[in-house]
Image (cartoon, rainbow, N blue to C red):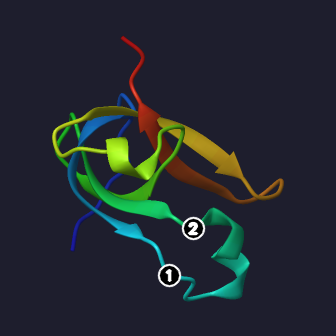
Amino acid sequence: MNFEFKNVSGRGKVFSFVTFHRVYRPAFAEDVPYVVALVELDEGPRLLTNILGISSDQVRCEMPVQVVFDDYDAEVSIPKFRPCKA
């Protein structure tokens, strides 16, 4: 149970994903369809996150992505990902 913080590049690839077409929570009704993905960072760890900036039918496994932070307030930022710019 030894953990430590390390800086990472914020780049990775989509390992797996699912597109939600149904509203399960009213708070996400305007986001449907949305992608929930398992992103593997270049450094190895995997994060469960959302893919932004691309239509859900364009998301693919192995697609390179880059982190963006969704700032909910001054104390909470959620890492989400967008396709890498070529």
Quadrant for the C terminus, please.
Answer: top left
Residue 70: image location, x then y, percent: 66, 49
Residue 74: image location, x then y, percent: 83, 53
Q: Are marks 2 and 1 in contact (CB under 8 Å)?
A: yes
Give the total of numbered labels.
Answer: 2
Q: Residue at x 34, y 41 (%)?
A: 58
Front position in the image: 16 or 56: 56
Q: Residues within 10 Å of mark 2 (few under 14, many from 20)?
A: some
**Element type where label 1 sits in the image:** loop
Q: Residues within 10 Å of mark 1 (few under 14, many from 20)?
A: few
- The reply, left or right, for residue 69 in relation to residue 9 is right
Q: Work out whether 47 lies above or below 24.
A: above
Residue to which mark 1 is pinned: 22
- The reply, left or right, for residue 34 in relation to residue 76 is left
Front position in the image: 16 or 10: 16
Q: Work out whether 79 lies above or below 10.
A: below
Q: Amino acid at mark 1?
A: Arg
Residue to which mark 2 is pinned: 32
- The reply, left or right, for residue 39 in relation to residue 23 is left
Q: CA distance from mark 2 to mark 1?
A: 7 Å
User: If you read the primary sequence from the N terminus, does the residue marked by circle 2 or circle 1 appear first?
Assistant: 1
Residue 27: image location, x then y, percent: 72, 79
**Element type where label 2 sits in the image:** loop
